[in-house]
Amino acid sequence: MKRFQVKVCGNNSVENFKALTEIEPDYVGFIFYPKSPRFVKDETIFDIFPNAERVGVFVNESIETIIQKAQKFELDVVQLHGDETPAYCQELIEAKHQQLLTSEQFLDFKIWKAVGIHEDTDFEELRGYQQVVDSFVFDTKSNQYGGTGQKFDWQLLKTYQLSTPFLLSGGIQLEDALVLKNFQHSQCIGFDINSGFEIEPGIKNIEKVKQFIDTIDGRIEQN
């Protein structure tokens, strides 16, 4: 298994996504938040089957809608990017299990919870999520929902000591690849990239994404 995995989020262009699948990121993300400029409008993008796990990003969405989208689009991961509480996550787990019992169509997915990080973040406040999420996505704190395209101080993660793994997100650029390749934290499983690799919202610079993945995987050395 690779030391780090890479998620490419915010895909909403069918042709661009076809090109992205050829470089085989570990995860591909689709945003189901209508206020996002990367909101998925053309659902034919889900007719493309990548060699990657599908992540659906939701913001304060109803449990029913998440179950419906996860089943319809065969999502492998549900990423919660709003104000969802541990109780909400538990309810989502129960709804998933109920659907598994009552539906002929197989439904299963991991749950990731996005958390905005700032200098006063107390990671102990996340302890209640440990039994109900599979991973955190640590992004830069914002007053609005969704990513900011800005980095937070990664040194703050030295105080994170919970057992739940995390992906690092927030303003990651190609220039960060060599540093991240050598990132030191036992619970970091990968990186979530988006706006720093875009030509315009929803359309990725495929060559930049490929260089980033190749550097993280150790296939190339970045100067």
Image: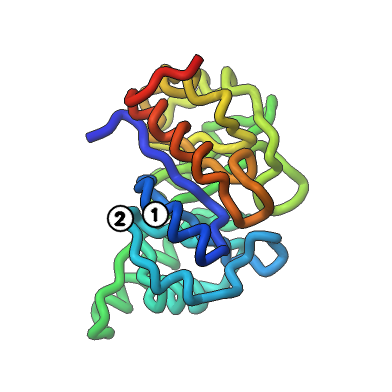
Q: Circle 1: is it few (<14), some (14-19), or many (20+) Cα within 10 Å?
A: some
Q: Badge 1 is on which residue? A: 21
Above-or-below relation of 150 to 23: above
The Cα–Cα distance between marks 2 and 1, rounded to whole angstroms, is 7 Å
Q: Position of residue 54 (x, y in %)?
A: 39, 59
Above-or-below relation of 1 to 219: below
Q: Is residue 73 left or right of residue 193?
A: left
Q: Earlier in the sequence, mark 2 or mark 1?
A: 1
Number of the label disc, if any, that sits on residue 51:
2
Residue at 44% across, 38% down? 210
Q: Is residue 200 left or right of residue 156?
A: right
Residue 205 falls in image quadrant: top right
What secondary structure is found at the residue carrying circle 1? helix
Q: Are marks 2 and 1 in contact (CB under 8 Å)?
A: yes
What secondary structure is found at the residue carrying circle 2? loop
Mark yes or no: residue 131 visible: no
Residue at 45% across, 51% down? 112
Residue at 69% across, 61% down? 36
Mark yes or no: residue 199 visible: yes
Tag in front: 2 or 1: 1
Q: Position of residue 55 (x, y in %)?
A: 44, 58
Q: Is residue 212 left or right of residue 198?
A: left
Residue at 52% across, 51% down? 9
Q: Amino acid at mark 2?
A: Asn
Q: Amino acid at mark 1?
A: Thr
